[in-house]
Amino acid sequence: MSKPKILLVDDEPVVCGELSVYLNRKGFQVSAATSVDDALELFEHEAPDAVITDYNMPRKNGIDLLREVKARDKLIPVLMVSGESDVRIAVQALHEEAFDFIPKPVDPEALVKAIGAAIERLREVRALDGTRVMKALYHELGGSGESVSLLTFHRALDERIKQRLIEDIGNLLAKNVLRKKAILIFKNVDYINNVGFNALVEIVRNLRAQGIRLVSAQIPSSILNYITTLGYVEYFNVILNLDEAMAHLADK
């Protein structure tokens, strides 16, 4: 079994170094950052199972990081560490859906126990949630008797779901259950990165290779901005309104 991956964030390099060595010895794979911006970059590349962050850091603090992590993946547990005596910070952290609040000076054994509980909870949630990335439904186009496949994505599109996403599409193609017209629906997607985007490009290419006509609809502004910036609006044949997308395919 692979080691659980931990992202450790503290603006004091000595603290990062000491805790990293300790947690590595306890069986974790640790990546460390000394700022929120560096931590977010590592978060996207390393896909950690849990984040441990100090609260009091310059420019952006632990609450800022907590919010950014939850915006990318709501399931990832974040443990907040602080030497502040004010319980206000603990209350705010828990209100922002931190998994736990750990006071400084950190008790290493208590920290390991808290990390273990966080990762176990993550596994339980993922087992209940499944790794469902996409749901396939069908909808009749007007009164023609012809139907369209509605492929709705339910998770952030990143490296965590790339393989499952490609497998799901492959299974649908192998079963020959997809209609010849399909709409990709992104209304439940709140985050995408380069890995997820490249997976989408591959999926669209595979579907079109099977003669399936595609349009994309109900795209949140953040995802649309991402696609637009990369110049892929026409590639994904974006039609924001679902009814208009239906009408567009009905006319084909």
Image (cartoon, rainbow, N blue to C red):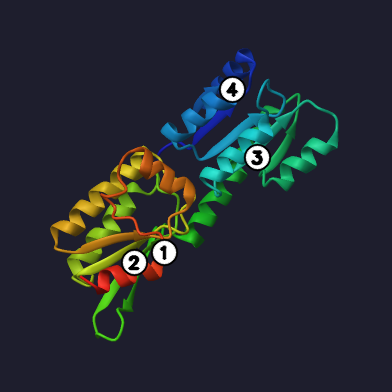
Give the spatial CA distance, label 4 vs label 2: 43 Å
Q: Secondary structure at mark 2?
A: helix
Mark before the other along the chain sequence, 3 or 2: 3
In the image, 163 versus 59, the foreground residue is: 59
Identity, as a three-letter code, of the amino acid under mark 4: Ser
Residue 232 x, y percent position in the rendering: 30, 45
Give the spatial CA distance, label 4 vs label 3: 22 Å
Give the spatial CA distance, label 1 vs label 4: 40 Å
Q: Secondary structure at mark 4?
A: loop
Identity, as a three-letter code, of the amino acid under mark 1: Asn
Residue to which mark 4 is pinned: 35
Q: Which mark is residue 245?
A: 2
Residue 180 x, y percent position in the rendering: 19, 70
Mark before the other along the chain sequence, 1 or 4: 4
Nearer the observer, disc 3 or disc 2?
2
Q: Residue furthest right?
A: 86
Nearer the observer, disc 1 or disc 4?
1
Q: Is residue 29 left or right of residue 69?
A: left
Identity, as a three-letter code, of the amino acid under mark 2: Ala
| Quadrant of the drawing holding the N terminus | top left
Residue 56 x, y percent position in the rendering: 72, 25
Identity, as a three-letter code, of the amino acid under mark 3: Ala
User: Which residue appears at 18% of the width and 65% of the height?
Assistant: 174
Mark before the other along the chain sequence, 4 or 2: 4
